[in-house]
């Protein structure tokens, strides 16, 4: 598969430049040269590919041979992820990105040890982009604004299937009933300390159901990927 790079906006012409940090990485780190083929995307699903025709110190140019657009699948897969400890954040975001999350919502749950910081969104986006490049994913997951539980429940829609991953749930995720009317599947992942009873009650009152991922307890950073894999199989994508 072709190496993937991102730009803010794709050219509508017959050539495409790659500059900035992405251009520097392609030239100085990956040492790409004239004649090699790469793919360049805008993160919204649009992409072009072609052969490198010019290489500068920190930039390159390709002749566009092909262009396309990746469409979002239905239903939309949304992961509400409790803010993880800093040493687990990179791993968590990599897994959610390669697992196919369409949107990631950072959740400041009651028992979160870490707090959302002013630069957290920038750091999360950077990790998401790097994971997407590794996975050759041209459409980046949307990173929503950080929410509290009170804000989260206001985001739910009538045609959502809202699933809280919880070890004490009575049924497994394979038993989830997904009707054809479901427009969004929302997976809620709690922090390492667990989701409080009050949060469970508030989320359930807003339409969420609890489900468990087998007998073993997963880390918060791993649970979202496992749940995405199960759901992807249930809806026939995997």
Image (cartoon, grey):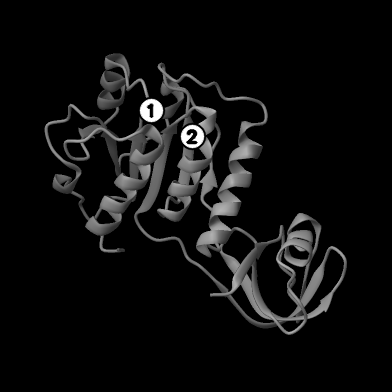
- Residue shown at 18% from the left, 40% from the top: 214
Residue 133: percent from left, percent from top: 58, 60
| Rendered view: 115 above or below 6 | above
Q: On the image, which quarter does residue 171 sit in?
A: top left
Would residue 161 appear left or right of 94 to someone viewing this image? left
Would residue 172 appear left or right of 121 to someone viewing this image? left
Q: On the image, which quarter does residue 134 sit in?
A: bottom right
Residue 207: percent from left, percent from top: 26, 31
Q: Which mark is residue 88?
A: 2
Q: Secondary structure at mark 1?
A: helix
Task: Please identify the quadrant where the C terminus is shown.
Answer: bottom left
- Residue shown at 82% from the left, 66% from the top: 59
Would residue 205 appear left or right of 97 to someone viewing this image? left
Residue picked out by circle 1? 153
Mark 1 to mark 2 CA distance (whole Å): 26 Å
- Residue shown at 46% from the left, 41% from the top: 92
């Amino acid at each position: 598969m072709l190496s993937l790079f991102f730009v803010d906006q794709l050219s509508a012409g017959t050539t495409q430049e790659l500059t900035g940090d992405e251009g520097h990485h392609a030239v100085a780190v990956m040492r790409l040269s004239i004649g090699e083929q790469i793919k360049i995307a805008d993160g919204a699903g649009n992409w072009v590919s072609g052969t490198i025709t010019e290489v500068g110190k920190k930039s390159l140019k390709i002749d566009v041979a092909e262009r396309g657009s990746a469409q979002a699948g239905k239903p939309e897969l949304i992961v509400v992820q409790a803010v993880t400890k800093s040493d687990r954040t990179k791993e968590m975001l990599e897994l959610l990105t390669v697992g196919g999350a369409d949107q990631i919502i950072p959740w400041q749950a009651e028992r979160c040890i870490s707090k959302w910081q002013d630069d957290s969104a920038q750091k999360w986006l950077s990790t998401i982009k790097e994971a997407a490049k590794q996975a050759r994913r041209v459409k980046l997951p949307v990173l929503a604004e950080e929410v509290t539980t009170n804000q989260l429940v206001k985001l739910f829609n009538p045609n959502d299937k809202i699933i809280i991953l919880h070890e004490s749930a009575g049924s497994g995720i394979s038993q989830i009933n997904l009707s054809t009317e479901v427009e969004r599947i929302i997976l809620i992942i709690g922090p390492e300390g667990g989701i409080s009873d009050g949060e469970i009650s508030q989320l359930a009152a807003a339409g969420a159901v609890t489900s468990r991922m087998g007998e073993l307890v997963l880390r918060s950073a791993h649970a979202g990927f496992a749940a995405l894999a199960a759901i992807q199989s249930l809806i026939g994508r995997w």
